[in-house]
Amino acid sequence: MKKIKRTPENNQIAQLENETARLKKKIAKYEAIELKQNRFGLVWLDVPEAFENDVENKLPILEEVPKLAISSKDDKPIHLLIEGDNYHALTCLNYTHKGKVDIIYIDPPYNTGSDGFKYKDKRILKEYPDGTEVPKEHPLRHSYWLSFMQKRLELARDILKDTGLIFISIDDNELAQLKLLCDEIFVERNFVNIIIWKKTNSPKAQAIGLGNQHEYVLMYAKNITKLDLNKRIGIITNEYKKMFSNNDNDGRGLYRTIEIEAHGIQNNENRKKFKFQGRLAPWLYSKKTLENWWKDGRIYISKTGRFRKKEYLNEIEGRLVSDLWVDEEIKPLQGASSEYLDFATQKPISLIKRIIKLCPNSQTVLDFFAGSGTTGQAVMELNEEDKGNRQFILITNNDEVTNGKKHKIMTDACYPRIKNAIKGHGSKKSIDNSVRYFKTAFVGKNNILKATDEDKIELAHNAGGMLAIAENTFERVEENNYWQIFENKKQYTAIYFREEFDKFDDFVERVRRLNKPVIVYIFSWEKEFEFNEFEDDKNIKVKTIPQPILEIYKQIYNLV
């Protein structure tokens, strides 16, 4: 294949198209102002965010740090740790994981004034123009927080599967604002519930009002119509298990008995009586159903002669869970040091486990405010308990925080915690898992709206880490100045990243020698193009770079 030359006119046309798209978006935004002013919802001053080192003018990528990988020989999914600002990491995940994540749980800053949340205002930075700090009670504090959260929640929404759920921890400071913001981003009809959980054993002293013991978790569906609402979302708690105390030693295990005869208001004049096993009663079920239960040994007769049904614990998938979580399984902050590290805002592992259990078929769990890594540890422990194969993706920056001592969030807290959980620490046994460590990085000299051909070439040359994540192929097999090859136990990912095609025939020959299915990425100036070299091999699927990545980024930039 010959290199397709790009003229200056091509670059100018591409940039004009991007600028046109941006202006159209801006016009549509202004046209909607009057509608927004007359609608019900949340309105605030949208504050542009300033990022360090002018990275907003470059293209984000994910680069692996191989020396920090933790490997095991098991067949479990490989977990991901991503160090960097979650806005840029989520931008990259919108390419690698768009529509692939089952559960998102986040514990964002609560904007209390003392939780370390500082929004970098692009216009006036952290202070008023005269240098004074914006006070906690100023309305602009809410605008800062809402602007910060909106961009990240919009990115998170597109990463969720249609059947996915997002859970957001919050307290009273921003609960009302967050609810309205989520109603707008996820659409109000996709609101599921607000979980209230007991955080402390004793009320926290307040300057005004009642003592506080609880926090909230907002729960939204990506698309509530895609959820099977006929199947109850439920979990089995220890408190619930205590109801199953009977055992006939017949191999079926513990059971409880439930009513099958109508009593009280259920036994009304419309309820018909009929004889079953010689007993005339107003039954709650049909005669055929009762006969099937009798044949199966599921009818229990009490000492007083009343008939009841045996309900076995091992056949219960779950029970309808209350939105009030105050039972003994959720460990409160006080008296539960094994659940908490030295982060004042950390959540108990038991809370995260219960949230994940609400989604029994979940495979991928994302936390983009990962902090000390509680969600990662919860996923690994839960996999050990129920033989699950969930994968976690944790995103956190490496800013320095002070809470009794200075430490960096990712390198001093999150990564060591996950490593200790895998290798075993203290009295805890090891959990055999694998983790790959990535950092956000930036390429090019311009953002997507002004990207030149040079920027696109640099993106293609450095996209290998993201493509490995997208295809879940992390083992590096081969790398040279023209291509990269990664693999897992089921497939390869082969990437020809150069715009010159003078080594392409060699690449084709190399791909044909691979002994597993291959996803092939080939440099192209267009999103799609005709490619015939592999059309005779059904085990080889061809995709292009960098244009599909740029298309995702373009959609994101046009939201801002």
Image (cartoon, rainbow, N blue to C red):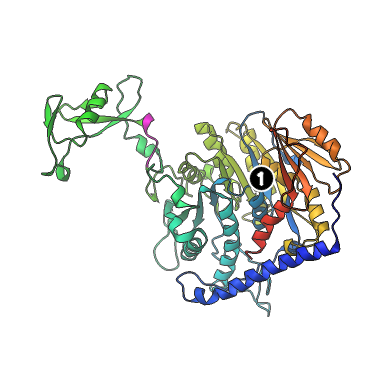
Q: Quadrant of the C terminus?
A: bottom right
Q: Residue at x 44, y 45 (%)?
A: 330
x and y, in percent, of residue 318 in the image:
39, 38
x and y, in percent, of residue 350 in the image:
48, 43
Which quadrant would residue 24 be assigned to in this image?
Answer: bottom right
Q: Nearer the viewer, residue 74 or 90?
A: 90
Position of residue 22 relative to residue 352, above or below, is: below
x and y, in percent, of residue 472 in the image:
67, 39
Position of residue 242 relative to residue 411, above or below, is: above
Which quadrant would residue 6 be assigned to in this image?
Answer: bottom right
Residue 308 part of the magenta-drawn span: no
Q: Quadrant of the N terminus?
A: top right
- How many residues crowd mark 1 within 10 Å: few (<14), some (14–19), many (20+)? many
Residue position marked by numbered label 1 in the rendering: 81
Residue 318 part of the magenta-drawn span: yes
Is residue 199 visible in the rendered structure shown here?
no
Q: Nearer the viewer, residue 469 or 6?
A: 6
Q: Residue at x 14, y 36 (%)?
A: 282
> Horizontal placement of 285 versus 32: left or right?
left
- Label 1 secondary element: strand
Is residue 43 visible in the rendered structure shown here?
yes
Q: Which region of the structure is painted magenta?
A: 314-319
Q: Nearer the viewer, residue 12 or 458?
A: 12
Which quadrant would residue 448 be assigned to in this image?
Answer: bottom right
Q: Residue furthest bottom?
A: 130
